[in-house]
Image: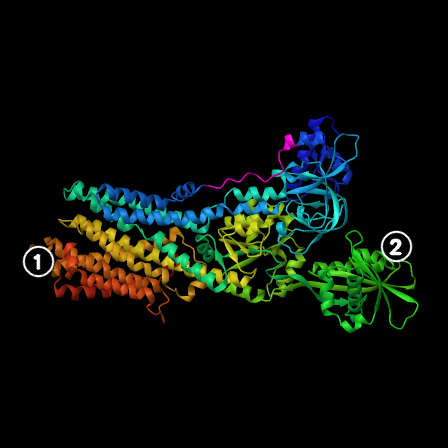
Amino acid sequence: MPAGPDAGRAQVGSWAEGVQGDGTGTPPLVSGNRRAPADGGGAVTVLQTLRRLESGPRGLTEAQAEERQARFGANTLPAYREASWAATVLRSTRDPFTVVLLCLGLVSAVVASWGTACVILLLVAVSCVLRASGEHRADRSMAGLRGLVASTATVLRRAEEDLPPDDREIPVEELVPGDVIRLGPGDLVPADVRLLRAQGLTVHQAALTGESAPVAKDAGDGSAGGGGAFDRPELCLQGSSVAGGSATAVVVATGARTRFAAAHSRTENGREASAFDRSVHGISWILIRFMLLTPPLVLMANAALRDRGLETLPFAVAVAVGLTPEMLPVIVTMCLARGAALLARAHGVIVKRLPALHDLGAVDVLCLDKTGTLTQDRPVLEGALGPDGHDDPEVLRWAAVNAWWTLQLADLPAPDALDDAVLDTADEDEIMAYDGVAALPFDPVRRLATAVVRTPGRLGTHTLVVKGAVETVLARCALADEERARLLARAARQADDGLRVLAVATAERPSRAREYTPADERGLEFRGFVTLKDALAPTAAAALRGLAEQGVTVRILTGDHPGTAVRACRDLGVRVPADAVLTADQVDRLTDPELTEAAERTVVFARCAPEHKARVATALRAGGHTVGYLGDGVNDLPALRAADVGIAPRDAVAVARESADVVLAEKDLTAIAHSIAAGRYSGGNIATYLRITLSSNLGNVIAMLAAGLLLPFLPMLPAQVLAQNLFFDAAQLAFAHDRPHPSVLRRPILLRPRDLLRFITGFGVLNAVADLATFGVLTLTLHGPGGLDDSAVFHSGWFTENLITQALVMVLLRAGRDTAGRLPGPVGWAAGALAAVGLLLPVTPLGSLLGLTPLPPLYYLLLAAVLALYTAGLGAVTKLPWLYSCAT
């Protein structure tokens, strides 16, 4: 061991890094200042641990503790700084669409279009406040971590090197690596520790893993442990609590080096842009390009061909505003808020971040753990097999006798989950026929439990009934080596098939008064195996079928044995091919591109540590999927952040629940299916709004540009453009209350900017053709002073035609290809009102204020013919799958 304090510091740091740095919980060996692979797959003895930490069973001296406190700092979570409201609001203005609206509002103010400027700036303010409130609430989520950390700890400290240690209670902030602490029932584990001694120790790790059952821990060398740090029996991690027993342990990691703090720091790094964010950004940049191009084109065309100067600037700004879906923030917020309110009211699902509801509608891959979703957190009996491998009810009877009398005579507070499953199935009368004498309860070292009973009709004889781990029980049975190997192989096949296997054996002993000890558990007669499986969640099978009908595929990310997860899937009717299973070791050997490819065909990822779950979610997103992740423990935090939308049940640990985007009333896949449906309804309405408003606006802009080149006057006054836009926007508020066609539930709703651009271009050109046809109608039919030079009549005719065509677009593009049996609904009524405004406004006093004038009757007849042709063309184009598919 290197001498000197610096060497000690290096060793402590290396150990702490080994506990949480690689995600496996396997401590590295240290030779001088170099790290070397651990022998035995990471097995490290207690003596090696103490040597590396330069500590001992008597703990540290006060001087050593002070030196290490200065070196490693306080045992606290990294400082959390909550952003101020002002900073959060400012951050919410950074998306491109908000910037576009701000610029248009300022330009409108410069050209004295005060009404337009006020409306736009008000919409921006409402949008930013709504977004900032959600982000500010999310920023406070990490405060829940501190409630899971202990405040004091019992530590062994010495005043001097040669003095005996004293037990003392100190604040957890003063703990340092190398401290020896004591743990008892109810204690919170104050740091990451390695057990030195343990007696019947069981630990609740629900705050870390979400699993409700306590986990047995012991002070062995860890060679039997597998998986991550949560699964290693010799390690107890900060954030867990002692359920029963007692222990002495040495602190191996404190502060930011603990696994708990590592999960915390990963959640503060911020998540990548979600599906909603990516879609909005893509659409915003499309609009930015159009709007940057439109005003200069209007100005240059009018200057070059009509010798008009800056007097056309208000019209150019009005055209750019007309292209902008300035109601988008309001429509999106209303659609999502209404969907979220209905979800909360009908299914108890809380959407904490409104855009997450859209992301739910876009989800096509759902990642989840097995326990609590596909299965309940309890086992059920599968079968009882005799030595020959056939069903044998005697094996179940002996297993139940063992479970019952161990529970009664050992004075246990409640039966073990496996014992509970056995007792639920056994015949109570058969159990009560035996009279209990003594019990040796289960402990993590022996890995078996023994009940001593009097068998009815056999005086002077006691029967030892032993039940426990297969290897341990068979080692105590009087069997030939070949027979023992055959039975072990049979048990291994059962385990590979996803079953938990317990061995049952008995032995006859002369009755006696002295106590029974583990030494009596020898020379047993093997009775058979009891096999158990996870109880299936009642709604899981139906929910999986529902998700499949919605086009959502499920990926199982679990820390369990792969056979256990595959068995649960098979019992639920989900086929898992042999090549659709990957273990964590196999994932570690894949590069990121290889994992992205493998994740496409893999259904079950087994033996996963938190890092594997997050990496799989990231790989699926890299493959073009929109990913939802359901998790409930601290170990799920990285994956919750890596997914497009994080989902947690209400009874999840506080930090997971606060970090999630969506919170379920229960850990139930049915609730997720309802949430996805609500997301698709809301996303469908948003997609319909964007299709209609952008295609209509683009058609109008093209027509205005053409009219500006053909006419000796402006094709429409700026006030008329803005009034038309205001009426159209008001009508489109109905989309927030619309109910899309049920077909939208069958596929993810995702706004793809490229496809949307193709759609709005196709329909925008069709709109422009209708407008140009209207110009021809006006040319042929209007006979005012100067013919086509009568600008008021032209403005009125085009104003009416624009609003009616927009009303038609609202109805026909809303229905799309699914027109059968569709009722008008709120959108139909709003479209009718919009058409009525277009027909009636020119003959009202308000119309004259806008510069509109009544039109001759002949115009309406020819306009009806144009609109009929337009409707036919619109209906024909909506039947083209390649064009209409961009909606989803």
Residue 801, given in percent of the width and then of the height, sits at 21, 60
Secondary structure of the residue carrying numbered label 1: loop
Residue at x-position 36% and y-position 65%: 817
Of callouts 1 and 2, which one flags the residue occurring earlier in the amino acid sequence? 2
**Residue numbers of the magenta segment:** 69-83
Location of mark 2 (residue):
519
587 displayed left or right of 803: right
- Which label lies toward us, 1 or 2? 2
Location of mark 1 (residue):
784
Q: Amino acid at mark 2?
A: Ala
The kind of secondary structure the magenta stretch mainly shows is loop
In this rendering, the answer to whether 455 lies above or below 314 is: below
Q: Is residue 73 magenta?
A: yes
**In the image shown, does 874 or 473 lie closer to the viewer?**
473
**In the image shown, does 830 or 664 lie closer to the viewer?**
664
Q: Quadrant of the N terminus?
A: top right
Residue 350, given in percent of the width and then of the height, sits at 49, 57
92 displayed left or right of 618: left
**In the image shown, does 694 or 536 lie closer to the viewer?**
536
Residue 426, given in percent of the width and then of the height, sits at 75, 70
